[in-house]
Image (tube, grey):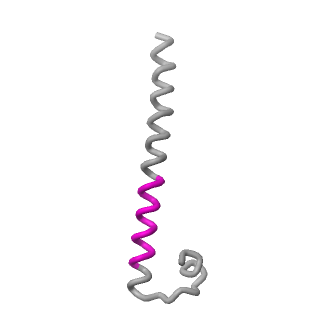
Amino acid sequence: MFAGIAAGWYALNIVSIVGFIFIYMIIYIVVWLIMQAVWRNQINKINEKLNAKN
């Protein structure tokens, strides 16, 4: 579906456009939440190192 839309092979009607946007948003939110957890973990490690020096 994604490659078809990107390459122009998929029918461009409102249902396919809304479906594509909906699935894209879900994937984006999931990746963002995962990366937010990774970044939070890295920030905590850096803070622990900084606090250990003081």
In the foreground, 50 or 13: 13
Q: Is residue 27 magenta?
A: yes
Location of residue 34 with respect to 43 vertically, above or below: below
* Residue 53 location (% of width, % of height): 50, 12
Residue at 48% from the left image edge and 39% from the top image edge: 39
Location of residue 50 with respect to 2 vertically, above or below: above
In the foreground, 50 or 20: 20
* Residue 17 location (% of width, % of height): 43, 80
Magenta highlight: main SS? helix
Residue at 41% from the left image edge and 63% from the top image edge: 26
Question: Given the current orientation, which residue lies at the most extreme top position?
Answer: 54
Residue at 58% from the left image edge and 87% from the top image edge: 9
Q: Is residue 21 magenta?
A: yes
Location of residue 4 with respect to 27 vertically, above or below: below
Q: Quadrant of the N terminus?
A: bottom right
* Image label count: 0
Quarter-wise, where is residue 5 in the image? bottom right
Residue at 54% from the left image edge and 75% from the top image edge: 2
Magenta residues, as a range? 18-31
* Residue 14 location (% of width, % of height): 39, 85
